[in-house]
Amino acid sequence: MISLPTPPSRAPRRHRPSTVQRALTTSAAAAALAAVPGAPAVAGLPLHAAAPAVATPRVVPAPASLRALSGVSFTLTRRTRIVVRPGADRAGTYLAAILRRSTGYPLPISRTGGTAGAIALSLTGGGGGEAYRLSVRRDAVRLSSGTPTGLFRGLQTLRQLLPPAVESATVRPGPWSVPGVEVDDAPRFAWRGTMLDVARHFFTVAQVKRYIDTAALYKINVLHLHLSDDQGWRIAIPGWPRLASYGGSTAVGGGPGGHYTERDFAEIVRYAAQHYMTVVPEIDGPGHTNAALASYAKLNCDGHAPPLYTGTDVGFSSLCIGKPVTYEFLDAVLGRLAKLTPGPYLHIGGDEAMSTKPADYAEYLRRVAAIVRRHGKTLSGWADIGAATVPRGSIAQYWQPAKGSEKGTETARAAVRKGARLVMSPADHAYLDMKYTASTPLGQDWAGLVEVRDAYAWDPGTLLDGVTDKDVAGVEAPLWTETIVTDRNIDYMTLPRLPAVAEIGWTPQTGRSWNDFRVRLAAQGPRWTALGRAFYRSPQVPWPAR
Ligand code: ACM
């Protein structure tokens, strides 16, 4: 267990403002050092300076550029306003909701007036995508971006500069000080995703929203939903009612399962969009399809429906490649998802098709790619698709452990040669369902144990021989749920590893170091507690004392 450094002795200083001021300045300077990407960790730094508490800038993912302004801070008061310039209304409403809840301050949103004493949000028209600028000075907080998306990402940085109690669902005493900073930030990769497997166990709309809340804090922008597998079918499809009513009626271990109605799914899409997250729906095939095969006998080559399956084996099911009804089914399902999903991608699975002959697999991919194209979407699939048809511009998701899986690496390279870009989810780094240690009560270990450092210390641009940055669309951390049932289970496996993968996707490689990350990560612990998230207290991270 790594113990926290002892804070400087405060007792004699408490009543001597000039000394307190000096202590603050020193602490701010140390904090600036801690926040400089690549700088050594500041081992002796206390989490909070002497009162008044001004949090040190410890942001995850680390911004591309963050300059701490020594001795400068902005303090939120009962009189603080949120000033929104044209186009920034939504960002203002979002920020006000978070701040009002915990500060109890009115924080009126105003479209007019000066920025003095305010938090000012503006669309600059300059810069694109997710880039933003954040300036915290004594007189005001100013956040600007060329897009509402960038404003939203910048607000996540601002949240993390406030004291952890800002995340509380009830009014807390404050003080609400923000350390002075100049942040100039933009992501390394456009795709920074997480996947939730709602097939092995079903998660309600409310649970998915809660997961989106967690992920948004770390600037995750893709929510991949694994909607079907051997153990469950989770989305209602018109004309194919038994997929959901029967195929969705159970789960791993034999629980009651569940499925999303179209309205449920639309609500997830809406909530994700509110958090500037693209939903990527996955219908796995030709393997991982027992729930569909059990629901409709006609989908089986022999015309007999297998029983529902509630175990955890993989590789035993396959759609019937030669039957026209297979493609009627796929057209109905993918067509419906294309309509329900505003994002450009349909994920067609394609992994672990061990019960499909290679020639049949190739035929299946050719047909499914045509269906995806006909519905106006871009194909995404597990990188196994590299062995078959991969339309140019597709996304291939690398998932095998990076160590010792030459075949997985070869299919990924083949996908790149065919014009796909990779989303990197190496199981021995990015899988959120791997156990942290041998004694982790949840999860699996087929890809090894994945402690926080393993989740953090890899580079998607150099992990695979023959794959470089330009071949990589981004990163994704999948949470498979064979052993995951509750929100607490999700939290425990996700935190702290999802923020680790999020930083890999966001922060320039030259701005990342484990020693710096673990200190910034430690500062997230009290935030998760305030948010009601039950996280894994990894001994690799110097968490503040409880
Ligand atoms: C996978 O883990 N089979 C994608």
Image (cartoon, grey):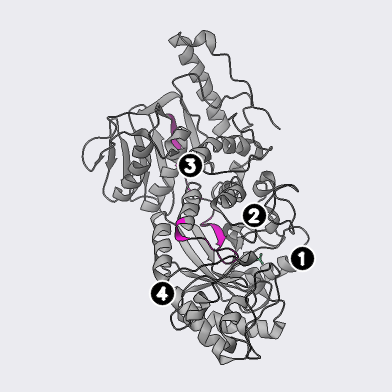
In 3D space, how far apart are the residues under numbered discs 4 and 3 (Cα atoms)?
A: 34 Å
Dot label at residue 406 = 1
Quarter of the image with the C terminus is top right
Nearest the eye: 262 or 88: 262
The kind of secondary structure element at disc 2 is helix
Tell me the kind of residue under disc 1: Glu
Q: Which mark is residue 430?
A: 2
Quarter of the image with the N terminus is top right
Circle 4 sits on which residue? 339
Q: Label 1: how many residues lie within 10 Å, few (<14), some (14-19) or many (20+)? A: some
Say whether mark 4 is within 8 Å of ligand 1.
Answer: no
Residue positioned 54% across, 41% down in the render: 62
Sooner in the amino-acid sequence: mark 4 or mark 3: 4
Mark 2 vs mark 3, foreground winner is 3
Numbered tag placed on residue 531 in the rendering: 3
Nearest-to-viewer mark from 1 and 2? 2
Q: Is residue 198 magenta?
A: yes
User: Residue visible at 43% across and 70% down?
Assistant: 261
- The answer to whether one can see residue 285 in this image is no
Labels 2 and 4: the sequence-earlier one: 4
Q: Are marks 4 and 3 in contact (CB under 8 Å)?
A: no
Q: Which mark is residue 487?
A: none
Nearest to N terminus: mark 4 or mark 1: 4
The earlier-in-sequence mark between 3 and 1 is 1
